[in-house]
Amino acid sequence: MSMKKSTKVLAIIGITLSTLTTIGVLLFQRVKKLIEYGLKVKRLEVISASLNEFKMRITLAFSNNSDLQIVATKMEYDIFLNGVYLTTLKNDKEQVVYPNAISDISIDVDIDPQLILRKLNNSAGGSGLGMILNLKEQRLMLVTKLWIKFGAFSLPITIPFEDTIKNWKQQ
């Protein structure tokens, strides 16, 4: 008994889709361990600060609890202060997160302090300067979006981290 050509093509497509789905489920189960992360600020280094420019480097210690070596191909960091969106930082430099280890991930910050202060003033009813003066007590949220490379696949993972600024370095 011979199968029609169209039936063979549909069978091949079905088997291919089933195989890719199975691979995706297995990858997700391993990536799920990665999401059980530990993310801590390791170092904050101010490079330059003025009224028009603020440059700094943030080094995060990323604890990879999975058995996979992760290559982050793209990273975006949305920064919020007391729930107010301030800016998005982007990093297209590949960074490696080693399996079952703590790896450093760096973020280079280059922002306009006056623009940030205007956003804070608008959202806080004019008390943005007060928030800046009492910065250590403010809540900082970093929403990290990593694009992780697994062979030919690139999967996005979102990791939120929030705490008061004074606690970031103590963790």
Image (cartoon, rainbow, N blue to C red):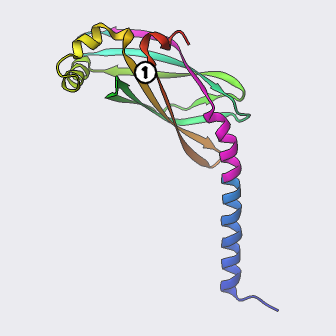
Residue 162 falls left or right of residue 55? right
Up the image or down, 164 lies above or below 2; here it is above
Q: Quadrant of residue 23?
A: bottom right
Q: Pick whichever, 9 or 162, lies toward us.
A: 162
Q: Quadrant of residue 46?
A: top left
Q: Is residue 44 in the magenta section? A: yes
Q: Is residue 131 in the magenta section? A: no
Give the percent coordinates (x, y) of residue 22. 71, 57
Q: Quadrant of the N terminus?
A: bottom right
Residue 17 falls left or right of residue 118? right
Mark 1 residue crowding within 10 angstroms, few (<14) / some (14–19) / many (20+): some
Task: Say which element carries label 1.
Answer: strand
Give the percent coordinates (x, y) of residue 51. 22, 11
Identify the residue shown where x is 23% and y is 19%: 117
Residue wearing tag 1: 108
Identify the residue shown where x is 26% and y is 20%: 112
Give the percent coordinates (x, y) of residue 4. 71, 89
The residues colored magenta run: 25-48
Residue 10 falls left or right of residue 106? right
